[in-house]
Image (cartoon, rainbow, N blue to C red):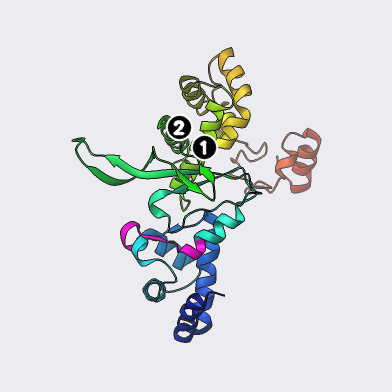
Amino acid sequence: MDTDWDRKMKLFKAKYKLEGIGLITELFKTIYSEGYYYPWDEESKILFADEHNIEEDRLSEMVDFAIEKGIFDNGIYSKYRILTSSGIQKRYLNSCLKRNQVAFCKEYLLIEPQIPDWSKTEISMVSFKEVSDTGNSEKESLNPVIDSGSTQSKGKKIKVYKNKEYVHLAEFLAEKIEENDPKHFHNKNKIKKITSWANDIRLLIEQDDRSIEEVKKVITWCQEDYFWKSNILSGAKLRKQFPALLLQMNRGKPRASPPPRPPKICPICQRQIIGTQASCSGCGLPVKDFGNSRVIEAYRKQNGIT
């Protein structure tokens, strides 16, 4: 039993009662729905407060106390503005042991990932550092770059990406998706998704024997095709559908969006139907009967319309 953790939670409960326990529960649910951390910037606070019907000042007060008491790691929060802890990361890793792959950001890690012998999980480490424009120093960035090192965990090698192009292609896919839908990543953990997509693209290239140039061309093509751009919204889908995408791409240009349907016009009063109206707002004729001449004629006689 983790007595230190138990004490932290008792302190939090003693100060904020059931309101505080409810908040921590919702925060943990939110974190685990995203992975093992959750960005905690001003926008996230506003959205969380609105979704859970709590005053922003009260929310900030309780979360700050939780960070101060170590329920969430203070050092990681101060540096990266995310909520996480060693306990959260351990529980997340344990929940992933039946997966084939799981990705971690090296800078966010508070634990040394340990993989049991029975698990086939492959861990990929991603670093969020980039070389500055001068090339002489490093600066922190939200653009993931592949770490060239590796580490060991209980005799198992934790694999790292060996080619930065995997992440670059994942970022390229994200950019193309955002061009089609600027709000696609709204309130979603974009960094975590790119990290996961980079691993899907690594498998696409290394295991499926596809070239980097080929993958980039297919990404461009599918995000211009009216059918595929609404279906290829992840690295996993890109890999799964790659043979079909490549075949269709080689056949010709992306399919343009179909022309918009002409507006529905009431045959009696000539009003335009807006949205999903079930009947005309002018004369009341049901939309489903617009093309039925017998119904239209009977409706005219019944309502004295000439």
Quadrant showing the N terminus: bottom right
Query: Residue 199's mark?
Result: 1
Q: Residues within 10 Å of mark 2 (few under 14, many from 20)?
A: many
The residue range painted magenta reads: 78-88
Circles 1, 2 touching at the beta carbon (< 8 Å): yes
Whether residue 174 is situated above or below residue 154 in the rendered picture: above
**169 sits to left or right of 292:** left
In whole angstroms, how far apart are the C-alphas of marks 1 and 2?
7 Å
* Left or right: where 134 falls relative to 82: left
Depth check: 79 or 249 in front?
A: 79
Tell whether position 86 is magenta.
yes
The C terminus sits in image quarter: top right
Q: What residue is shown at x 56% (from left), y 22% (from top)?
A: 209
Residue at 52% over, 42% down: 157
Answer yes or no: is residue 212 visible.
yes
Label 1 crowd (10 A; few <14 / some 14-19 / many >=20): many
